[in-house]
């Protein structure tokens, strides 16, 4: 079968307040902002180690899609989620699930869940290590 997906350009998150979102993604998570348009309520951040961007804009109910606070399933990585979560909390971010070790078949990861000011949730996990 021929692949119909050849890459990922961006993940879009709907937000209620673009200025609050900018502060969270830029200052709390430390992502580099690559574009901002305050007139239309849009911002774009680079995701380290990828060519994918994290885009956000103020949600308009007429456009459809998920309302602010309903994003989940996006996974970020860090070699040490425990220290990353401590820094996120120190910067004012919200930790939904504290870092904990899980053992899916064949490997081990440390994972946690963080949330932006609108309640959009992101998994933050370590790279997988082979199970012992």
Image: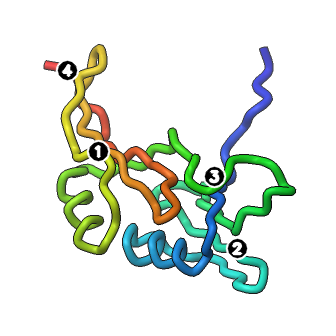
| Tag 3–tag 4 contact (CB < 8 Å) | no
Q: Nearer the viewer, mark 2 or mark 4?
A: 2
For marks 3 and 1 on the same chain, the one whose residue lies earlier in the sequence: 3
Closer to viewer: mark 4 or mark 1: 1
Question: What residue did someone put label 3 on?
Answer: 11
Taking the spot 56% from the left edge, 53% from the top edge, the residue there is 69
Label 3 or label 4, whichever comes before in sequence order: 3
Q: Which of pointers 1 and 2 indicates the residue nearer the eye?
A: 1
Cα–Cα gap, marks 3 and 4: 31 Å
Drawn side of residue 25 relative to residue 90, left or right: right
For marks 2 and 3, the one nearer the N-term is: 3
Picture coordinates of residue 6 (x, y %)? 72, 37
For label 4, the residue is 131
For the N terminus, the quadrant is: top right
Q: Residue at x 29, y 40 (%)?
A: 111
Residue under pointer 1 = 97
* Front: mark 3 or 4: 3
- Name the residue beneath numbered marker 2: 42
């Amino acid at each position: 079968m021929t692949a119909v997906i050849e890459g990922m350009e961006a993940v879009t998150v709907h937000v209620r307040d673009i200025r609050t979102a900018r502060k969270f993604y830029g200052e709390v998570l430390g992502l580099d902002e690559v574009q901002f348009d305050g007139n239309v309520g849009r911002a774009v951040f680079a995701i380290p180690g990828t060519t994918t961007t994290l885009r956000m804009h103020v949600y308009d109910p007429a456009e459809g899609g998920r309302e602010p606070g309903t994003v989940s399933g996006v996974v970020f990585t860090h070699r040490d989620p425990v220290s990353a979560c401590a820094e996120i909390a120190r910067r004012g971010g919200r930790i939904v699930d504290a870092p904990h070790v899980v053992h899916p078949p064949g490997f081990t990861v440390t994972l946690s869940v963080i949330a932006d000011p609108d309640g959009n949730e992101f998994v933050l996990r370590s790279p997988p290590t082979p199970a012992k």
